[in-house]
Image (cartoon, rainbow, N blue to C red):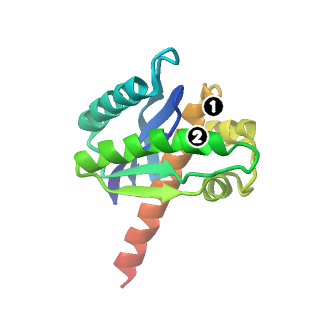
Amino acid sequence: MRAVVCGIDPGLGITGYAVVRARDGAVAVLDAGVCRLDARLPLPDRLVQLEADLTALLNEHRPAVVAVEELYAHYRHPRTAILMGHARGVILLAAGRGGIPVRAYGATQVKRYLTGNGHAGKGQIQRAIQATLGLVKLPEPPDVADALAIALCAAADLQAEKAREVQR
């Protein structure tokens, strides 16, 4: 099974992305980084900037799937979830316009897949990504590690589905 997966960690200041290729149980990182949005711009202008950056990324790599974190609202910070919903909507739009299926994963599901602990902290995720991918140093900023974690979770999910299909 060979699949290119793009994992995206939505944000209105920094959106992390990672593009990985999964092949026969092995994963290679093709690209990873962040889209930095100008916080001085009004929200609509930042969303336009994010859409342009993501469209360019998706056109360059042509992933089979875009994986994104589910929206989560903390009762102490409901405004954060609302604002993140804007960025997530742009991600879904860019993928939809490109005809790319989207998979959504809960934060605890991604953390559990990578570390065995659904409540792992940012540092744990970074160290798990470093160990899993054999990186010399921690992926920075943490948004990149989060995007890589989402991409790895989706890649494993796709490989498991393919294995189940083969067994039928």
**Percent x, y of residue 89:** 41, 45
Task: Residue 128: name its quadrant.
Answer: top right
**Percent x, y of residue 86:** 46, 40
- Tell me: residue 56, above or below residue 78: above
Mark 1 crowd level (few <14, some 14–19, many ≥20, 10 Å Cα):
some
Reading the image, the residue beneath label 1 is 142
Q: Secondary structure at mark 1?
A: helix
Q: Amino acid at mark 1?
A: Pro
For the N terminus, the image quarter is: bottom left
- Tell me: residue 77, above or below residue 135: below
- Tell me: residue 85, above or below residue 57: below
Q: Are marks 1 and 2 in contact (CB under 8 Å)?
A: yes
Front residue of 145 and 35? 35
- Residue at 47% x, 49% y is 68
Mark 2 crowd level (few <14, some 14–19, many ≥20, 10 Å Cα):
many
- Residue at 35% x, 77% y is 166
Q: Amino acid at mark 2?
A: Asp
For the C terminus, the image quarter is: bottom left
**Percent x, y of residue 140:** 61, 25
- Tell me: residue 162, above or below residue 84: below
Reading the image, the residue beneath label 2 is 146
